[in-house]
Amino acid sequence: MQSRTNTVLLVEDHDVVRRAVARLLAAKGHQVATAASCSEALSHAGPFAVGIFDVSLCDGDGIALAADLLRRGRIGRAIFYTGSAKPARINAASEIGEVISKGDGIEKLLRSLGQADGDRQD
């Protein structure tokens, strides 16, 4: 069984991004639960070591969702992996957790999770 430190809740409403990130995290040894929406994320019991959230989701606000899950102890920390360039949204997210632009690539997300680039097996 995976330790709690390897558990990740990935909340991303774009299917292709969600599947690709989940596959990569699983290959790095993380136990990944995925959700395409706020309501789906709330259905996962957890707890999770980390929640990775898009800022804007199809049925709500990823920032509010992360804050709620943190408050309830369902995630240990929040990371926002987003394509949003709206300064107010980025600032609000940064008050809760680290913000990583999707434009910066997956490598920065992996580093935030403690994965070295050299861990990949190409």
Image (tube, helix red, strand yellow):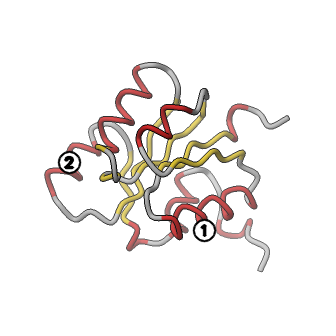
Q: Is residue 61 left or right of residue 46?
A: left
In this rendering, the answer to whether 7 lies above or below 113 is above
Q: Nearer the viewer, residue 38 or 77?
A: 38
> Residue at left 72%, top 45%?
31
> Residue at left 66%, top 57%?
25
Q: Quadrant of the C terminus?
A: bottom right
Q: Nearer the viewer, residue 4 or 120?
A: 4
Question: What is the three-letter code of the residue carrying label 1?
Answer: Ala
Mark 2 or 1, closer to the camera: 1
What secondary structure is marked by label 1?
helix
In this rendering, the answer to whether 57 lies above or below 104 is above
Q: Is residue 11 left or right of residue 68?
A: right
- The x, y position of residue 27, in whole percent, is 75, 61
- The x, y position of residue 110, in whole percent, is 58, 59
Residue 58 numbered tag:
none
- Disc 1: which residue: 20
For disc 1, the neighbor class at 10 Å (few under 14, some 14 to 19, many from 20) is: few
For disc 2, the neighbor class at 10 Å (few under 14, some 14 to 19, many from 20) is: few
Question: What is the three-letter code of the residue carrying label 2?
Answer: Asn
As drawn, which residue projects farthest toward the top?
72
- The x, y position of residue 52, in whole percent, is 48, 48
- Disc 2: which residue: 91
